[in-house]
Image (cartoon, rainbow, N blue to C red):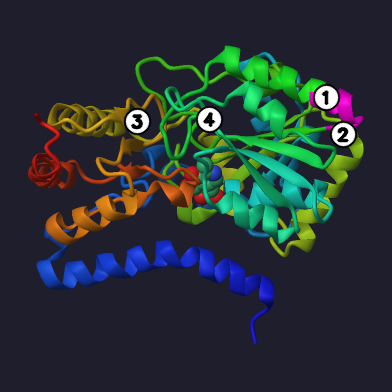
Amino acid sequence: MISEKMKGFVANSSAIRAMFEEGKKLAAKYGADHVYDFSLGNPNVPAPPEVKEAILDIVENEDPVLVHGYMNNSGYEDVRSTLAEHLNSRYGTDYSASNIVMTVGAAGGLNVILKTILNPGDEVIVIAPYFGEYRSYAGNFDGVIVAVNSDPETFWPDPEAVAAAITEKTKALIINTPNNPTGVVYPESVIRSIGKVLEEGSRKYGTEILMISDEPYRDIVFDGAEVPWIPDFYGNTVVGSSYSKTLSLPGERIGYLVIPSSVSDFENVISAANTATRILGYVNAPSLMQRVAARCLDAKADVEFYDRNRKLLYGALTEYGFSCVKPEGAFYLWVKSPEEDERAFAARAKDTEQILVVPGRSFGCAGWVRMAYCVSTETIENALPGFLRLAESYGLRG
Ligand code: PLP
């Protein structure tokens, strides 16, 4: 019954599903407290109190027909204006409601913008390691993902490698900072270089390459790391974000696209994005959550909590002899596999210590594993003896 295309998607998502099933089996065998699941990026800190206050106040005091009704497919005008003003005060921009499309999470926004721009066979450059769902999102519109390796030391995008990957079919480049899975925040100099490379590529082929900045983790940064506002460095940039991580609302499916007026063919792009939202079947972003988001623009989930987990996990694993990239943002730790095939390492961690990590090849980068540390601090504390035994079994401590 299912389409050939869906068969491909289902086969590709089976690894993550298998891990999920495996976690359930282990929990049944050893008890949930003795399974250490670092596989999912599901925030475990509650939404900040402002969210509940806003929900209650909106439901009590705003017009229910308005709060729960259809609106412009791009979202409520007043919500988009408030968000635009908030961005203006943060980044010195001059956006208005007409630059914003409220979306069904960051994932919905990526699908909207890719549907807006892709013809079949168009290429979308991504920087490996990358969020694996990009493959499905581009595939939805018969786009082709072109993965370009990041610098193997820093995991920053490599401008020369990006330049070499550009062809006449390149329609977009997706960057993601703070990054899932590495936790790296790209410095301004790198963003600037990538912008230049895209300008040169567009000139060379007479095309207009769109930069898509996927930034659901923008506000989860540590040690004062700063995430540059990407359209400042390359005008033909669309920013996609969401409140899934910064307000801990992943199930509520609320996010937005910023389509600056500097984007090529702006009027057509914004009107196509508005249409894409409708015809993808999302119609509009969840109405109540749009209104909640507009009231919580200065609120944040407990980033200190993630920071404590980050320090605990990074500190312990490096002490045990694992090589890790020190995360500057998001809530992932990128760990070098102590054996060449990281799937074998992940299997050993699971079978001997009930520790679940995701093999890097799911992110287009073998030899590494990703750990999501948006888990309880006890989960990390209780998993550490297992990591120590693993380190010893690989002779990492010398
Ligand atoms: N982009 C990246 C890099 C992500 O890690 C995620 C979710 O984990 C998303 C997009 C999707 O976010 P949302 O839940 O807001 O759709």
Q: Amino acid at mark 4?
A: Ser
Quarter of the rendering occupied by the N terminus: bottom right
Point 9% across, 29% down: residue:
398
Point 37% across, 50% down: residue:
359
Residue 23 visible in the picture: yes
Neighbours of disc 4 within 10 Å: few (<14), some (14-19), many (20+): many
Q: Amino acid at mark 1?
A: Ser
Q: Is mark 2 within 8 Å of ligand 1?
A: no
Q: Is residue 208 left or right of residue 232?
A: right
* Relative to 305, residue 5 above or below: below
Question: Magenta part of the protein: which range?
Answer: 201-208
| Residue identified by numbered label 3 | 303
Q: Amino acid at mark 3?
A: Val
* Relative to 373, residue 39 above or below: below
| Residue identified by numbered label 2 | 266
**Cα distance between the residues tagged 1 and 4:** 27 Å
Could you tell me which secondary element the residue under label 2 belongs to?
Answer: helix
Quarter-of-image position of residue 314: top left
**Cα distance between the residues tagged 1 and 2:** 7 Å
| Residue identified by numbered label 4 | 150
Identify the mark at residue 220; answer none if there is no mark.
none
* Relative to 28, residue 223 above or below: above
**Cα distance between the residues tagged 4 and 3:** 27 Å
Q: Does the magenta run of residues contain 138?
A: no
| Residue identified by numbered label 1 | 262
Percent across and percent down for residue 349 are 20, 53
Quarter-of-image position of residue 220: top left
